[in-house]
Image (cartoon, rainbow, N blue to C red):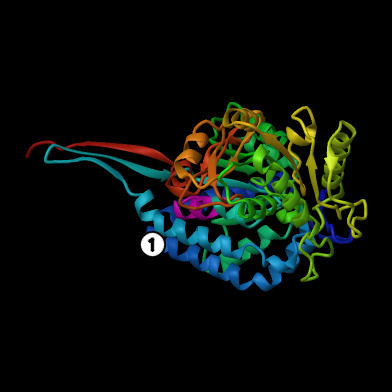
Amino acid sequence: MTTILRCISPIDGSVHAERPALSPEAAAGAVERARAAGGDWAARPLDERIRLVAAGVARLGAMNDEIVPELAWMMGRPVRYGGEFRGVAERSDYMGALAPEALAPTIVEESDAFVRRIEREPHGVVLVIAPWNYPYLTAINTVIPALIAGNTVILKHATQTLLAGERIARAFHEAGVPEDVLVNVFLDHETTTALIAARSFGFVNFTGSVAGGKAIETAAAGTFTPLGLELGGKDPGLVLEDADLDAAVEGLVDGAIYNAGQCCCGIERVYVMEELYDDFVEKSVALVKGYRLGNPLDPQTTLGPMASRRFADQVREQVAEAVAAGATAHVPRFEADDGGTYLSPQVLTGVTHEMRVMHEESFGPVFGIMPVRTEEEAIALMNDSPYGLTCSIWTRDAERAAAIGRRIETGTVFMNRADYLDPALCWTGCKDTGRGGSLSAIGYQNLTRPKSYHLRKLPG
């Protein structure tokens, strides 16, 4: 029996899109065609691959007026924010410009006696399993450098954003990238697992839950397939006594509430030096109360529904448990909160790390605030988490921020900003957040393997 994948819209619970999952045989055939296309694609000059990929990105941008409301229907992000194309273009432009340097051979010796060098060789077929919360941005983090480096790509999106992969593939095909070089597929979990276990791919990149990452690792066990895993976070903010308070409030609240808090690197817990604590709480609560919860297709809406009722209920449960254990919830229920996908944002004080809301990923529009007396106390609390994706430090002293950052178990240290991916820097994490890294020159290193050449020249 064919499995039907359905995107249930958080706007009204309707079925926004549905697609049949490929059979195991059809999925294996798609992978085989991508593998067969790899030789010709990798043999193309690098500048040609860069040009074709850039054309694909431009074609995707031309679809943005259709993509923005489509994202609202699929996962609830308000149309007022304009979609993801600006970030897609920024990352794509940077990775394209970086490619000649990042993929250039390392020359050790070129003499009359020897040629010794290290070249970068594509893995082959790269599987990209993209999440629903930023379906374009997260996908292109791997798709762009993978294609530029000479790999072919199998792209599988989450069911919640079922149409995103179709659009990416269509845009790139219309721009001239061969159809078997970038293949969008609809797969169920069982078929995906079987393909990985069969060593179908040269590299697998997965963005999603810790449980999903463990399933990928289990499927790949014994295949020696290299993996890139980004598995979420519980990212902390720290407001030091010399911080610009208004900037800290604005940046951290946006980092916590934007996209209904459904950001891998969203701010979920904030630690504030006690002399600023009361003012920070007051200003944060006032700002959160000013959000407008509603239909994401309305340009006046600043906070849309969560992607599914299940995710919203998890946040409600965490908040209710925290309040029952002594926390204070500062934001009254919004009128548009329907007890379903439409969820009021929340600011909590009186929280402790014994509460789930302060140690389990919430992935919703809620954050807790705790006062701290010293840097040592703050560092201990920030590190008291199974995750390590980013941290956000608010201070006027860059050296102090860097010194604290060195002691935080995290992948990225921000100062005076949060929730941003700089394509020049490696996007990576530690602990349960996962392994590997995308973007930057390191992203190219992960999507290729080194190949050494030791060429001895004989006399005469």
- Of residues 163 and 77, the one nearer the viewer is 77
Q: Is residue 198 left or right of residue 7?
A: left
Asked if the magenta segment contains residue 415, the reply would be: no
For the image, the number of numbered tags is 1
Q: Is residue 146 left or right of residue 260?
A: left
Report the residue at 82% width, 49% height from top.
Answer: 2
Tag 1's secondary structure?
helix
**Residue 266 vertical position relative to residue 435 in the rendered view, above or below:** below
The reply to whether residue 273 is in sight is: no
Which class describes the residues within 10 Å of circle 1: few (<14), some (14-19), or many (20+)?
some
**Residue 183 vertical position relative to residue 68 in the rendered view, above or below:** above
Q: Which span of residues is magenta-colored?
A: 143-153
Q: Which residue is mark 1?
A: 47
- Of residues 72 and 336, the one nearer the viewer is 336
Report the residue at 44% width, 61% height from top.
Answer: 50
* Residue 261 spot, x, y in % from top left: 73, 50
Report the residue at 87% width, 49% height from top.
Answer: 309
Q: Amino acid at mark 1?
A: Asp
The reply to whether residue 111 is in sight is: yes
